[in-house]
Every structure is written in structure tokens, then in C-alpha cells.
Image: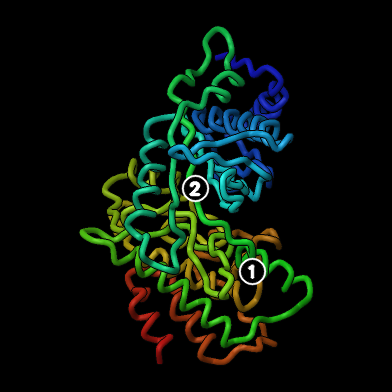
Amino acid sequence: MIIKFNSFSIYWKLIASSQSESRGNLHFINRRFLLTRKEEPCNNDSIYRAIVRMSCVWLDMFRCMNNAELVTFNERVFRIRKRLGEGAFSFVYLVQERSTGKLYAMKRIVCHDAVEQRNVENEVKLYELLDRCPNVISCEDFSIGPAAAYEAAIHGQGDELSCDKMVEINILLPYYKRGTIQDELDWRKISGDFMAETRLLSLFNDICNGLNALHSLTPQPYAHRDLRPANVLLNDDDSAVLMDLGSARLAEFTVVNECRARQLQDYAAEHCSMYYRAPELFAPNVGDKLDERSDIWSLGCLLYALCFWESPFEYTFDKGDSLMLAVLSANYRIPTKSPYSKTVHDLLKFMLEPDISRRPRLSAVMERLKS
């Protein structure tokens, strides 16, 4: 197969080179284009998605460089001001409404097939279902249209991969000027400044309230699957607001065969940040039954990060040891000079149970918080 990539051909050469060196197992890691995880191989479809994604990165950079792109939501016109951040499959921009001057955040996702489009539409549906929860971000509006600019950029000749089904979805969200909890943890880590325990528990309680809204949906509960400090915003009143429901799925899942096990592992590799990923998502086995308690593991890792500025397993990975083995055995340490009470330490241990069948549900965690 020949893929002509116009001005982006250099990236195809990089990918082809990486694939050749690893004999088909692509380990192409870049913090800016975090497409796969270090421990997991990549197939031809993933290579294609990598190429498309890197095209989108460059196109988005050019589209907002002159601060001129206009976006419309139901006759409301917005101007893109700057990029706020990006995820594995999306970009987030600061936009300003022309008629009022009010600032918003806009999440842009380019879907290259119908499955991805359904997943994004499901994300919008979840925002609508959780609209009344003050600890979950609300959706102001959304738009769906063809991703014409992206299709033009990756158009080639010969036996190319078809891009005629690519769709661009824009989601309009409130703008939180204080950013995420991760932003605060970054400067706290540099300065060695621990968060006060009362504030820490207040933020954690807000996060639990937001997560509880997701776990309590009827007729079937949903799991967030990507709980981490970068997905929790800080409001002006210092409350915490859960965001990014793009990885959320129905909580209950049974691994009925090897194919489903591989699908679950691939999904986790793409959507669940590895430092906060539950053990059962690293190495699923046939017969495993998953539910919303996968989020409780991530919640425990998040509480640890609130205390000590990073995931309990980041240190292991930075040393070069196996992250997966550390997670599967719950091999982490609480710093000897921790300023926090035994209550907080016990809450961490309560949630970081590697066996999902013995791990507590959110109701039990919230009951401990109350007591």
C-alpha cells in the first residue's frame, strides 16, 4: 500500500522506519502525538490513524495561527483565540462569542469512521444526561460537519486509504480560567508545596459527587474510564468539575472470549491513561467481569496525586521498571514524610485494591468520606 501524504510525508517516513526497526510492532512515542502506549504493539489501522492524527495536528496549527477561524453553533458565531490543549483524539480551543465577547472552550474531534462518530455522539448524550450535576462539565452546544480540510490534506493517489467518511464534531463547553487540577499539581511539585488536607478532601468529595452521577445513570451505569487530575477542572469557587466523557462507556462488561479481551485491551491502551489505569484493563482474561469499580482504582490514584503530586506508579515507570507489574501487584509506597493523616492513607489503601471483586464501590468510598 502506498500512502502519499503531501507536506506530511516526513511523518510517514518516520513511522515506516519505526515499524521496520520493530518488525511490525510500532512503538512510536511522542508526548505531543501520544498515539500508542510503550508496552503495546500497533497494527496497520493504528498506523493509518497516526498519520491522520499528525495531519490534523499540523492543519489545526495552521488554521488557528492567524486567529481568524470562525465556528458557528446554531447561528451563534465564535472566533478561535488559541489552543488550550489536546488529547489523544481531540483538540481544545479557547473561543470567543462575537456578539457577547464571552469566552468558552471548544473541543474538536475528527472522526475517521462511523464507530468514532457514534462514540463522540454518545459523549454529547452523556453531557446532556448529567447536565444538572454541578460537578460534571456541561455541554453548551455542538455541531457536526464534514472534515473537508482534513480530507484534502491527506488525499493521495493510487491505493490510498479512503477518508470520505471523516467527520468533524465541535463541542462547545464552559471555559474554566483556573485550568485543571493537574496544572496546580505541576507547580506544587516544583515548589514542594503540599495541599491542605481539608481542601484536598473537599476537592476529592466534589470529584466523587461528579463520578457518582455517572455511576448512577439508569437503566445502566456508566464508567468514566479516564479519571486523572488533567480531567478535573477548578471552578472559581474552588469546587472540582469532572470533564472529558469521551472515554466513558457502559460500566458492566464481560470478557466472553479472547477477541473481546483484545478489544478491551486495545480500548484501554487508547483511552485510559496508563498511570491511572485499573489492573483489569492492563491484562484482561476470558471470564473477567468489569463494572464501575474500575473507576475506583483510578480514583485512588487521583487521590494519591492530590496528596503527592503524581500517580503512585509514575515513580516505578520513571525508574524503568514494569508499570503493569507494579499495578497488578499494587506495588506503590506512601512517602515517609507524608503530611496527611492516617485517615487519608487508609482511604488510599481502601481504593487501591488490585482485585476488582474486592474493591469497594463508590458508595462505600463516599461513606468513609462522611465519617
- How many numbered circles does the render carry? 2
Q: Residues within 10 Å of mark 1 (few under 14, many from 20)?
A: many
Q: Secondary structure at mark 1?
A: loop
Give 277 or 280, whichever is nearer the viewer: 277
Pick out the residue farthest to the right.
191
From where the camera sits, is residue 346 visible?
Answer: yes
- Whether 302 is drawn above or below 79: the answer is below
- Disc 2 vs disc 1: which is toward the camera? 2
Using the image, tell me which numbered label, if any, was put on residue 225: none
Distance between the Cα atoms at labels 2 and 1? 30 Å
Residue type at tag 2 = Leu
Q: Is residue 67 left or right of residue 199?
A: right
- Whether 10 is drawn above or below 270: the answer is above
Pick out the residue farthest to the left.
219
Figure quadrant of residue 185? bottom right
Q: Position of residue 236 (x, y in %)?
A: 59, 71
Q: Position of residue 237 (x, y in %)?
A: 56, 75
Give 220 or 292, whichever is nearer the viewer: 220
- Whether 335 is drawn above or below 43: the answer is below
The residue that mark 2 highlights is 172
Residue type at tag 1 = Glu
Q: Earlier in the sequence, mark 2 or mark 1?
A: 2
Q: Residue at x 69, y 21 (%)?
A: 9
Using the image, tell me which numbered label, if any, was put on residue 310: 1
Q: Residue at x 37, y 60 (%)?
A: 131
Give 87 or 140, whichever is nearer the viewer: 140
Figure quadrant of residue 6? top right
- Whether 155 is drawn above or below 134: the answer is above
Q: Position of residue 291 (x, y in %)?
A: 32, 62
Pick out the residue farthest to the top.
158
